[in-house]
Amino acid sequence: MPEAAPLPLDPRAVRLTASAVGRDDAIRQCGRALVAVGAVAEPYVDTMIERERSISTYVGEGVAIPHGTLAGKDAVHHDAICVLRFPDGVDWDGEKVTVCVGIAARGDGHVRLLAELAQILLDPERVHALREATRVEDVVRLLHPTQEETAG
């Protein structure tokens, strides 16, 4: 099986001590992190909110994966993810979210990103470590496992 490319995570798009007044604020912060690393243009952020209003991006275990709508694809410069950790949690339609992994992808790249994230998020130990991470390096390591970690 060919080795998957690492998730496109710029360490500058990792924020470990974020706080938000609610779901939409958390999503906007994710969008701004993607804008800050040049992955998307500002209009993409609004499509992330639109997506959330049509279908929740909460995936369980305190994690949400906000991303834009099809209409937002034109605002994506390159595939990227961001990771925002909300230590105090954010009310996400009645669920408590502590980690948001924002996604931006050109074409159908979001399918690959979501599949790779699903593999990580299906591992309870890695999800727990992601929720508890206090260093950017730890987040990058969790999302970019080495050959030894994936083989064993």
Image (cartoon, rainbow, N blue to C red):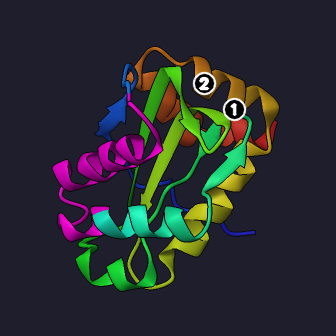
Residue holding disc 2: 131
Q: With respect to residue 139, does 56 lie above or below?
A: below
Depth check, front residue: 59 or 138:
59
Q: Which residue is at 44% across, 39% downward?
A: 83
Whole-angstrom CA distance, mark 2 to mark 1, is: 6 Å
Give coordinates of residue 41: x percent, y percent: 18, 67
Q: Residues within 10 Å of mark 1 (few under 14, many from 20)?
A: some
Magenta range: 20-45
Query: Is the residue 89 above or below the residue 9 in the image?
Result: above
Question: In the image, is 112 to the left or to the right of 150?
Answer: left
Q: Quadrant of the N terminus?
A: bottom right
Q: Residue at x 34, y 78 (%)?
A: 72
* Front-most of residues 131 and 11: 131
Q: Is residue 111 left or right of residue 70?
A: right
For image coordinates 73% across by 52% down, the residue present is 119
Residue type of the residue flagged with mark 1: Val
The residue tagged 1 is 127
Question: Residue 32, percent across and down?
Answer: 24, 49
Which residue sits at x=55%, y=63%? 113
Amino acid at circle 2: Arg
Residue sitting nearer the eye, 22 or 17:
22
Locate the C terminus and report the quarter of the image it occupies: top right
Q: Are marks 2 and 1 in contact (CB under 8 Å)?
A: yes
